[in-house]
Amino acid sequence: MASKSSMRRNLQTVLTDLPDALIVEILSWLPLKSLCCCKCVDTHWRYLISHPEHLKKLPQTLAGFFFDTEDIGRCPKVARHFANIGEGPQIDPSYPFLPPEFELVRLEDCCDGLLLCCSSQRSFRHLVCNPATERWVVLPALPADSSCVAQEETFHLAFDRDVSSHFHVFQIVLKEWRRVAGINIYSSETGSWSFKESGWDSDTSICTSRRVFYQGILHFLSAQSTVVSVDMEGNKWRAIPVPEGVKSSEIGFLGLPKGHLHYMVHTGNRVQVSIWCLAKYDSDEWTLKQHVDNNKLVNVRRIAYDYEYAIISYHPDRSLIYANHRDNTLMAYDTDREEARVLCSVGRGSLISCFPYVALFNDSSVPLSSWLLLGLVNKPIAAM
């Protein structure tokens, strides 16, 4: 009987003799965690997995961040940036593939490889684009109906390549005291907008900058100490109480590390953050995972307070928290190793928005009808 070492050598010989195209095809069927382990097989496999052409076929993880900075001494005062923190593509934040009519656009949201932008040059029209494939589509204007008039326009993109082949855009409709009256929902499947009255408590107000899209449902943090959610059709509305003992004055942060909904908030006189996980999504029971001292998160040898940094995102596949330090550096904190490191400087000006980006190289899962809406697939706006 052959020894284990002999069998291992024979298997390695067989794998080495396979054509590169076949190896890449086999690797494309692996989950992301297994794919990362395959980088350690040998240098050739690492080269195959990291090659820009092969990346298009393989599972993706966090590639970087789109962020805007504002400096009143600069013209224009708002500048767009992209920070590449992984092995993904280097994206041009000027979106050169868009037509001249959309040269001045503001990034409003980013979800699973697609971007939602607003143009100030065309009566604040919105478009959804994929910077990895340079495909884009302009959304139709909201219908001129009294139910679709919002006091404040806040738009959010919802797309999950593993859940649905269509994307949705949400506009939150507010009434007095910033309470939610309802939502306007655009569906790429129907190519139209619809209005749904709020199914949350009548006094619900939300923090629109603290949201995640998970299992086909959009989640927000509310000022009423709940995590509120709504599905893509506006039919299922839910409110999940935040963990017991969290002060009502504290508005935390939502994330999706390793496929579970997480909630993080400052505790302990605001010198630490506590992280909870909703392991069973259908329940309202949060599990405390750990406490993280602020000084560890921003890598200083003194007491650090919450105002010294802002949480930006969780890594979707690793135990990493991303934060912007007040000295304008983007930092990553490993909650397993309890180590922090500086990723890059955000440059001149103050950070006004930041969105994590996972490249979508194959948007064929998004039906062609979604990109052909109004006849727009890399065609000038005049084609309308």
Image (spheres, grey):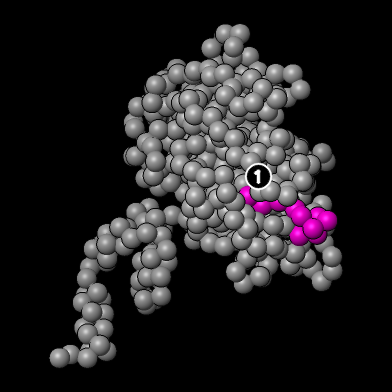
Quarter of the image containing the N terminus? bottom left
Residue 39 horizontal side relative to residue 317, left or right: left
Q: Is residue 285 magenta?
A: no
Q: Which residue is mark 1?
A: 242
Given residues 277 and 127, the one toward you in this image is 277
Residue 183 locus on image (x, y percent): 57, 23
Q: How many marks?
A: 1
For the point 34% across and 32% down, the residue is 367
Q: Is residue 266 magenta?
A: yes
Mark 1 is on which residue type?
A: Val
Quarter of the image containing the C terminus? top left
Look at the numbered disc 1 and give the secondary structure of its residue.
loop
Specify the segment rendered in magenta. 262-272
For the point 57% across and 62% down, the residue is 319
Name the dominant secondary structure of the magenta segment. Answer: strand
In this view of the protein, can residue 326 be seen by the observer? Answer: no
